[in-house]
C-alpha cells in the first residue's frame, strides 16, 4: 500500500516516499536512483517539490531529463532570498534557494527541484548543458540575486544595465524609490551610461572579419517599429545573411516581482495587468488563483464561468492585434485597420462588463469585482454574431494572399524537439504539432465542461503560427457562446474571510463581519504560510505565478514566469543563416510583449 505524504498544510520536509498520485510517481524513480538523500517538501500544489544538495544537482537534473518519459522542458528557473523568512519550519537550512521547475509533456506533470545555498558561498553548476534555455534564466538569477552559475558561457546582467550596483531581489535592497538618494544625471554620467551600451562583438564570441571580408554589425532597436517594443537585437551580417544575432532585453524592466514584496495581496492585482499589457484579466487569473490556493478558497461556479468568458475575450483582442501587425509587417497595410475595428467592438463588451478596457484589474481573490451588469448577454451575443464572418474575410483576403504565404511559409521554422528544449509554449508550440493546451490537459476554472478544439500546425513556421492563432479565435468564440448560454446563477465572490471584503450591508448586522471588512480594506488579508503556484494557458503561451507566503499581508516572494521571455531567447537558434526580411517575419510571428519579457 502506498505511503501517504505529509499533508500540504504541514511545514515539514520528509524523505522522498511513495505516493499514489500519478504526478508523484517520479519520486519512486528518484528514490531508486538516489536513495533517501533527497528531501520532499509539501506545498499547496499537486506536483512534487524536492530538495537536493548542490553536489547532486547536475546528476538529478540529467536523470530527470533522460528518463524514459523525460522532463523535457526547463519551464522556469529562479531563486528566493530566504534570510528574512520566519515560517519555514522543517525545511533545509538555506540563506538563498535556487529552484528549477521542470515539465514533462508525456507525463503531463511537473517537478520542482530546490538547492539550498549559504550566503558566503553563492554558486551552483550551470544547467545550460542540459537545457539551452537555462542561459537567460541563470543570467537573470545572477542579475537579481548575485548567485554565480559555474560553467555558464556568458554570465552577466540581462535585465539591468551593466553599471548597476547591487542585486534588487535581495531582501536588503530597498523596494521603494523614496528609500534611495535622489537621482541625478550630469553630462559625464550620461556619457558613461551610453558607453556601456556599446556592443563589443568579441565579448560575445563574434568575429569582425575573416580572411576574405569584413562582417557588418546592424543594431536593430531598441526603438524600431519591427522590434515590437523596447527591444534590441544586434545582427552579424554577411551581406543580407544573418550569421549570428544577440537579443538584448531589459529596456522595459520595472521590477514587477520586487513590487509584490511591498503590496498587499489585493493591491498587487493591478500590477499583473501590466505584465502582458495586451492580456488584461488573463494576467490576473494565475495570480488570484495562486492566492486562492494559499488561502484554501473555492470560488462559486458563476465566478469560474465569468472568468473564462472574460479571459477568452482578451485572447481574441490579443490575437487580433497580433494578426493585424503580423500582416502589416509582411507588407499588408489595410487589414490592421479592420482588425482594430473588431478589437474595439470586443473592448466595448469588456468595458461594459468591467468598467475598463485594456487594464481592468477586474478579477479578485475569491471572485470578481462585481456581478455582470444588466444587458451583458445582448452585447456578447451581438459580438458573437459579428465576429465569425470577419475571421472568414481575413482568411480570404489576407491569409490566403500569395505574397504573405511566400513571405512566411517555411520561414523561421523549428520542430517540436527544438521548441521544447527552448521552453516554447502556447500557439508557437502547437504550431509544431504538439497537442498541449493547459485548458485541455490540466483544466482549470471549469474548462473541462466546455466543448472546444485545440488547433495545431505541422510545419512550425511563421505561417503556421499565424494560422493557429486565427483558429484559436474561432474556438474562443465557441467557449464564449457556451458561457453565454450556460451562465450559472449564484454569487460573484466566495464567502471566505480571506477573499474579497464581505458585502457592506452585512457589516451592519454583526461585529465579526465588520471587523473582517475593516481589516481587509485597511491592512489586507493575512495569508497562511506556504507556497503555491498556478499555470494558465495565456494569450502568448503558459503564464504562471509562484507565490511564497510568510504569514503576512503581502507576498514574501512572487515569481512571474512569462512565455515571451522564453520565446525571445530562442531567436538565434532559429534565425541564424536566414535573411533580414525573414527576421522581421519571425519577430512578427512570435507575438511577444516586452513588458512580458522584462517584467
Image: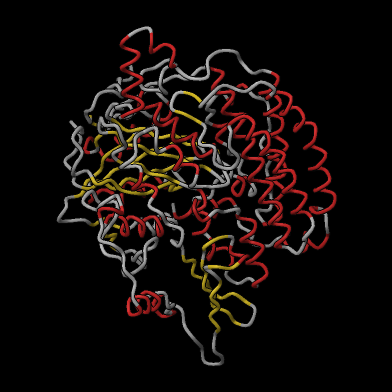
403 with respect to 574 (left or right): right
In front here: 305 or 433? 305
In front here: 317 or 10? 317
Residue at position x 34%, y 32% from top? Answer: 28
User: Looking at the picture, how far across and down is residue 502, in whole percent?
Assistant: 41, 17
Query: Which residue, as the protein is rendered here, is positioned at the far bottom?
Result: 212
Residue at position x 39%, y 59% from top? Answer: 129
Specify the quadrant of the image occupied by residue 23: top left
567 with respect to 32 (left or right): right
User: Looking at the picture, how far across and down is residue 343, in whole percent?
Assistant: 70, 43
Residue at position x 56%, y 76% from top? Answer: 243
Specify the quadrant of the image occupied by residue 137: bottom left
User: Looking at the picture, how far across and down is residue 242, in whole percent?
Assistant: 59, 74
As drawn, 597 above or below 10 = below
As drawn, 579 above or below 111 = below
Specify the quadrant of the image occupied by residue 441: top right
Amino acid at each position: 500500500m502506498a505511503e501517504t505524504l505529509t499533508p500540504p498544510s504541514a511545514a515539514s520536509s520528509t524523505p522522498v516516499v511513495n505516493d499514489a498520485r500519478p504526478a508523484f510517481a517520479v519520486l519512486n524513480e528518484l528514490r531508486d536512483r538516489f536513495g533517501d538523500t533527497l528531501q520532499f517538501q509539501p506545498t499547496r500544489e499537486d506536483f512534487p517539490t524536492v530538495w537536493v544538495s548542490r553536489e547532486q544537482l547536475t546528476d538529478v537534473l540529467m536523470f530527470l531529463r533522460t528518463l524514459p518519459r523525460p522532463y523535457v522542458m526547463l519551464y522556469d528557473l529562479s531563486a528566493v532570498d530566504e534570510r528574512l523568512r520566519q515560517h519555514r519550519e522543517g525545511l533545509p537550512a538555506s540563506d538563498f534557494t535556487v529552484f528549477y521547475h521542470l515539465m514533462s509533456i508525456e507525463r503531463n506533470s511537473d517537478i520542482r527541484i530546490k538547492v539550498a545555498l549559504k550566503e558566503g558561498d553563492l554558486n551552483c553548476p550551470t544547467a545550460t548543458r542540459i537545457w539551452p534555455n537555462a542561459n537567460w534564466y541563470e543570467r537573470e538569477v545572477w542579475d537579481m540575486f548575485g548567485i554565480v552559475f559555474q560553467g555558464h558561457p556568458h554570465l552577466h546582467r540581462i535585465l539591468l544595465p551593466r553599471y548597476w550596483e547591487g542585486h534588487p531581489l535581495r531582501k536588503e535592497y530597498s523596494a521603494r524609490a523614496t528609500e534611495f538618494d535622489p537621482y541625478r544625471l550630469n553630462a559625464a554620467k550620461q556619457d558613461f551610461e551610453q558607453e556601456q551600451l556599446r556592443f563589443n562583438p568579441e565579448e560575445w564570441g563574434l568575429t569582425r572579419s575573416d580572411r576574405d571580408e569584413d562582417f557588418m554589425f546592424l543594431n536593430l532597436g531598441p526603438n524600431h517599429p519591427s522590434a515590437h517594443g523596447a527591444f534590441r537585437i544586434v545582427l552579424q551580417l554577411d551581406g543580407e545573411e544573418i550569421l549570428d544575432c544577440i537579443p538584448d532585453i531589459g529596456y522595459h524592466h520595472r521590477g514587477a516581482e520586487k513590487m509584490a514584496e511591498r503590496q498587499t495581496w489585493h493591491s498587487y492585482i493591478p500590477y499583473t495587468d501590466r505584465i502582458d499589457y495586451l492580456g488584461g484579466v488573463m494576467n490576473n487569473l494565475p495570480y488570484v488563483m495562486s492566492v486562492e490556493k494559499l488561502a484554501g478558497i473555492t470560488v462559486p461556479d458563476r465566478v469560474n464561468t465569468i472568468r473564462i468568458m472574460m479571459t477568452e475575450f482578451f485572447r481574441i483582442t490579443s490575437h487580433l492585434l497580433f494578426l493585424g501587425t503580423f500582416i502589416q509587417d509582411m507588407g499588408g497595410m489595410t487589414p490592421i485597420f479592420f482588425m482594430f475595428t473588431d478589437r474595439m467592438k470586443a473592448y466595448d463588451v469588456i468595458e461594459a462588463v468591467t468598467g475598463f478596457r485594456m487594464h481592468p484589474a477586474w478579477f479578485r481573490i475569491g471572485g470578481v469585482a462585481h456581478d455582470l451588469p444588466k444587458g451583458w448577454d445582448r452585447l456578447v451575443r451581438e459580438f458573437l454574431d459579428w465576429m465569425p464572418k470577419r475571421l472568414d474575410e481575413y482568411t480570404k483576403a489576407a491569409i490566403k494572399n500569395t505574397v504573405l504565404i511566400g513571405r512566411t511559409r517555411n520561414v523561421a521554422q523549428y520542430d517540436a524537439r527544438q521548441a521544447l528544449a527552448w521552453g516554447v509554449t502556447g500557439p508557437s508550440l502547437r504550431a509544431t504539432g504538439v497537442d498541449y493546451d493547459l485548458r485541455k490537459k490540466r483544466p482549470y476554472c471549469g474548462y473541462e465542461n466546455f466543448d472546444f478544439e485545440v488547433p495545431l500546425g505541422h510545419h512550425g513556421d511563421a505561417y503556421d503560427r499565424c494560422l493557429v492563432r486565427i483558429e484559436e479565435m474561432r474556438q474562443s468564440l465557441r467557449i464564449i457562446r457556451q458561457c453565454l448560454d450556460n451562465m450559472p446563477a449564484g454569487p460573484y465572490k466566495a464567502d471566505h474571510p480571506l477573499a474579497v471584503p464581505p458585502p457592506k450591508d452585512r457589516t451592519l448586522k454583526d461585529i465579526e463581519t465588520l471587523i473582517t471588512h475593516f481589516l481587509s480594506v485597511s491592512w489586507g488579508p493575512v495569508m497562511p504560510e506556504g507556497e503555491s503556484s498556478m499555470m494558465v494557458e495565456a494569450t502568448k503561451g503558459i503564464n504562471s505565478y509562484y507565490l511564497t507566503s510568510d504569514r503576512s499581508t503581502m507576498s514574501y516572494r512572487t515569481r512571474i514566469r512569462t512565455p515571451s521571455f522564453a520565446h525571445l531567447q530562442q531567436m538565434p537558434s532559429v534565425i541564424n543563416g536566414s535573411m533580414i526580411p525573414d527576421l522581421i517575419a519571425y519577430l512578427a510571428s512570435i507575438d511577444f510583449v516586452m513588458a512580458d519579457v522584462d517584467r
